[in-house]
Amino acid sequence: CNNFYVSCERVFDPLLVGRPVVVLSNNDGCIVARSEEAKALGIEMGKPVFQIAALLKKHGVAIRSSNYTLYADMSRRVMETLRTFSPEVENYSIDEAFVNLDGITDAVDRGRRIRETVGRWTGIPVSVGIAPSKALAKLANKHAKRAGDGVLALADWAAQTAALRQTTVRELWG
């Protein structure tokens, strides 16, 4: 799921769409989620909100307290939607899952259908990374967020090598 906590907030408050948004930690002390618009302003993850209060005000950044009950419910909805595509869905975190697409002849088309269906049924935007291993799937997903339609397959050695060349070791999962 893309910018999951912010995306959940946007589902229930569409006026937040297109605006910079941050979600704060339990005690409203630190930023735990940012919209793409907030990231573009240079707002860092984990930053204490008091340190950047002037920046937030200057740019009209919408600030939301975390709502973990909402996020858990939206996560459940996303995971249930994924299970309509495969019985093998491994929940990795509140906003990530691995979906087994073994035997699917056109995995990219299936990825596009997953992305569209999750968005339509839940309102949550997702990116889909497809690859033969979990580590490569996470890498594909990272690149898919910036790809044209949000779906990227690293199905062959050439695609995998190209993606790895654009990635520092620190960015690799695991």
Image (cartoon, grey):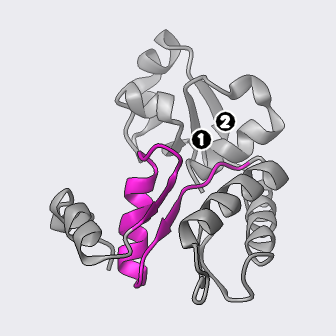
Percent of width and height locating residue 162:
21, 62
Quadrant of residue 68 within the rendered picture = bottom right
Query: How many angstroms separate mark 2 from mark 1 (CA)?
Result: 5 Å
Vertical placement of residue 134 versus 170, above or below: below
- Image position of 143 (left or right of 60): left
Residue closer to the observer: 162 or 8: 162
Q: Residue at x 48, y 66 (%)?
A: 129
- Image position of 168 (left or right of 48): left
Percent of width and height locating residue 140:
39, 65
At mark 1, the secondary structure is: strand
Examine the structure image and report whether residue 130 is included in the region drawn in magenta: yes
Percent of width and height locating residue 150:
52, 50
- Residue 64 bears which disc, if any? 2
Residue closer to the observer: 12 or 81: 81
Q: Amino acid at mark 2?
A: Arg
At mark 2, the secondary structure is: strand
- Residue 23 bears which disc, if any? 1
Vertical placement of residue 168 versus 154, above or below: above
Q: Decide: marks 2, 1 in contact (CB < 8 A)?
A: yes
Magenta residues span: 124-153
